[in-house]
Image: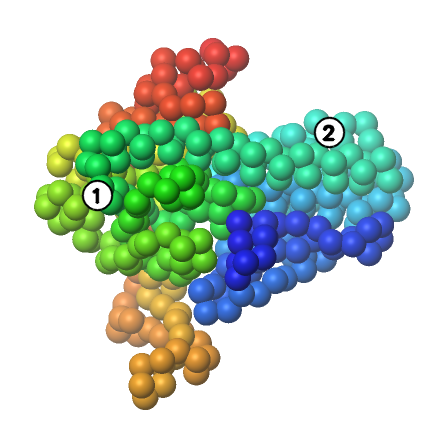
Amino acid sequence: MKVEGRHFRTIWTEGEGPQERLRIIDQTALPHEFRILDLHSVADVCRAIREMWVRGAGLIGATAAWGVWVAAREAAHLPADEFAVRMAMSMEALRVTRPTASNLVWALQRQQKALAGLSGAEAVAAAHAEAQAIADEDAEFCRRIGEHGKRIIEAIAAKKPGQTVNILTHCNAGWLAFVDWGSALSPVYAAFDAGIPVHVWVDETRPRNQGASLTAWELGQHGVPHSLIADNTGGHLMQHGMVDMVITGADRVTRCGDAANKIGTYLKALAAADNGVPFYVALPSSTFDFALRDGVREIPIEERSADEVRVMTGALLDGDGQAGQGTASVLICPENTGARNWAFDVTPARLISGIITERGVCAASEDGVLGLYPEQR
């Protein structure tokens, strides 16, 4: 996608040979600063995932894949047996950075197969090729999700000619959460580019405010009309007919259609069901965990630092209410107040109108999912 008219992916390499470097967009700086960081070591890559310099299921997977390439370069000088031990340690360090998104483990497993029996320069080349393939596939699959989801938006638009299609989303599942295009926002971009009048209700998405800081920023960069709302506003909008559909992303989806996504998604699904608003989940196949059947019982839910709830960071305003005075973090509760911070919840399949993937749209059920992915039966 584009930033100030220039195309960017969320992760890429620049240079050649020993000078080639891994680069990311530092998402912790957005929306107030567009900052690019270089990741020089496996420790850098692990920190980028763990501290959410990169975020979103697809991007976490792609970053882990590139992390394996970084690890192979660091260990390339070692004898084959020591190289294998070092790579196993690096992959484990990458694996434990974030527990919920299935894309991370999926990407590491692909790299493990690509590097089987290799060491030294051969392993470095193989890891680079596989990481690039994973990144390219992620971008292409998200583009296809956009095309499939656009048809749903077109059908809604046909029922209200001349009127705007209002779409509510939660957290960030745009191009910043993947390598390019995104999952939940890809249909929005496809519809907007096709001339369909759309407007997006952007949940702020506490506690890290990914909707306010990331979704609003990238929609603005693309020119898509949108309005930022408090997290608890969605039900009110649905009651008053101001939401035509909900689209969210996902961090892990079971073979039966249960979907884990940013905390608060379940509440949006309940409100949508109560008001007859279609609720869709968009994801590439790398986000499925076909080994799981019951999402509520089986998907691990990450609990993050309490300070993400207790502290907020934003731009400082001058006397005229304009940003540009730097940023600051502020405590929003009494100093001795404790907090708990579950990062995700699970929306049961019964509340999901359909799942949008790179292969098409299916029912949120085992038969529906396996109808698109029969090789997983």
At x 70%, y 42%, the residue is: 68
Figure check: 258 above or below 169: above
Residue extending furthest toward the left:
240
Residue found at the far bottom of this picture: 319
Pointer 1 local density, CA inside 10 Å: few below 14, some 14–19, many at least 20: few
For residue 367, which numbered disc appears in the image?
Answer: none
Q: CA distance from mark 2 to mark 1?
A: 50 Å
The residue that appears at 36% across and 80% down in the rendered structure is: 322
* 186 left or right of 39 in image: left
In the rendering, at what x and y percent does residue 153 appear? 31, 34
Between 161 and 70, the residue placed more toward the observer is 161
Residue 326 vertical position relative to residue 220 in the rendered view, above or below: below
Does residue 157 lie above or below 254 as drawn?
A: below
The kind of residue on which mark 1 rests is Gln
Q: Quadrant of residue 91?
A: top right
Residue marked by disc 2? 114
Q: Which mark is residue 163?
A: 1
Foreground pick, 235 / 298:
235
Judging depth in this view, the residue of 159 and 49 nearest the camera is 159
Assign a secondary structure to mark 2. Answer: helix
Mark 2 surroundings: few (<14), some (14-19) or many (≥20) residues within 10 A: some
Colour mode?
rainbow
Q: Percent from the top left, x then y, of residue 146?
A: 44, 35
